[in-house]
Image (tube, rainbow, N blue to C red):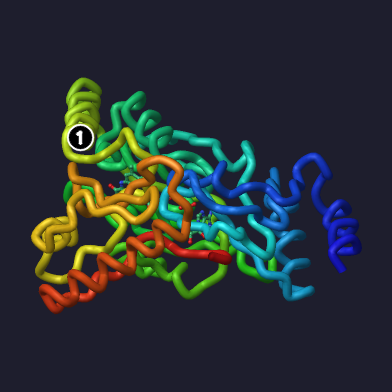
Amino acid sequence: MSEYFFDYLKTLIPEERIRRNELMSKHTTFRVGGPADFFITPESTEELSALVRYLNLVDREYMIVGNGSNLLVGDHGYRGVIIRLGESFRKVEVDGNQITAGGGAMLASVAEAACASSLTGMEFAAGIPGTVGGAMVMNAGAYGSEMKDVVVSVDLMTPDGEIVRRSCEEMKFAYRRSILHRDDSSVISTVFTLKEGQQDTIRGRMNELMEMRRAKQPLNFPSAGSTFKRPEGFFAGKLIMDAGLGGYMIGGARVSEKHCGFVVNAGNATAADILDLIHEVQEKVQERFDVRLEPEVRIVGEF
Ligand SMILES: Cc1cc2nc3c(=O)[nH]c(=O)nc-3n(C[C@H](O)[C@H](O)[C@H](O)COP(=O)(O)OP(=O)(O)OC[C@H]3O[C@@H](n4cnc5c(N)ncnc54)[C@H](O)[C@@H]3O)c2cc1C
């Protein structure tokens, strides 16, 4: 099956953009994760469309990833196809107050383009190390703003290989959620709307927020940012700290003492160490405060 499958894939995507047994540790900010059976980089909507249609037809598991900054992939990897949008999906174009960015563009590039054109509203996203696609799935946000505030519309590729446009409202953005949590479509591009501003002020705000991140977050260790969602009425980091878990380790995974909401790879952690630590933190916080922490990080693959 696998050889036939590979041969067919090569009719859809040039062979040099199909990798086999690609270590996901190279594609996640936790720097863990075993091999994906196939790791494919489409460079056009036509290639992406043909690929997802075929994968659905043969019922082969697949997943699209961005910068892997919200992903925990198991040590035994992923039995299926990982799709990562190629260079041609990373374009960022400014037109008046609007920016159109490809699903694979980094949020930092969108924020930079906004700043270069003296457009304000995107400063909050400059330090989020993810792509536009990942940000649409997660309704990424920081410092009181979120994607919902700046998105006009999102172009998606459905599992049938069709392109559909969804308005901001239709995306049903909510706290770290969107319609894409129950829809397997891929984000191919997003239109943002921003306001005219002063470039110095925009740059200043971006620098200020980056400084706040550096001061509060353990950016010198691999992580996936906040490991848990904010439970209603509480802060995950505070609950974890108050449960006495700051610095708690399993294998190479550690609850950051700088920011207890972050589980970090303190060196040579396995995905299993990180997952065990996530479970341990959930148990201990539940025991102590009767609050169930839900992971914000998406957990996939074989552990
Ligand atoms: C140091 C650090 C700080 C962070 N700070 C923040 C923060 O302030 N605020 C915040 O919200 N998050 C933060 N994060 C988490 C993370 O950066 C965001 O959730 C980000 O939006 C994930 O984007 P990504 O491209 O890395 O997605 P990935 O981690 O690659 O994927 C996340 C999910 O999106 C899906 N996905 C990715 N691309 C596409 C696409 N094109 N089409 C369809 N589905 C897709 C994946 O299948 C997966 O389900 C932080 C992470 C780190 C490491």
- Which quadrant of the view contains residue 106? top left
Q: Position of residue 228 (x, y in %)?
A: 28, 62
Q: Does residue 98 appear in the picture of this structure?
A: no
Q: Is residue 162 above or below residue 75?
A: below
**Distance from mark 1 CB to nearest ligand 1 atom below 8 Å:** no
Q: Does residue 93 appear in the picture of this structure?
A: yes
Q: Answer with left or right where residue 239 lies relative to residue 115.
A: left
Q: Is residue 4 above or below residue 14?
A: below
What type is the residue that disc 1 sits on? Leu
- Relative depth, front residue between 165 and 20: 20
- Relative depth, front residue between 171 and 272: 272
Q: Answer with left or right where residue 261 lies relative to residue 75.
A: left
Outermost residue on the top side: it is 200
Residue for point 33% across, 63% down: 278
Q: Answer with left or right where residue 184 lies relative to residue 195.
A: right
Q: Position of residue 73 (x, y in %)?
A: 52, 58
Query: Under tag 1, what secondary structure?
Result: helix
Image quarter of the N terminus: bottom right
Q: Answer with left or right where residue 159 lies relative to residue 32.
A: right
Q: Is residue 114 above or below residue 19?
A: above
Q: Position of residue 237 (x, y in %)?
A: 17, 56
Tag 1: Cα neighbours inside 10 Å, few (<14), some, or many (≥20)?
Answer: some
Q: What residue would you read off at disc 1? A: 209
- Which quadrant of the view contains residue 37? bottom right
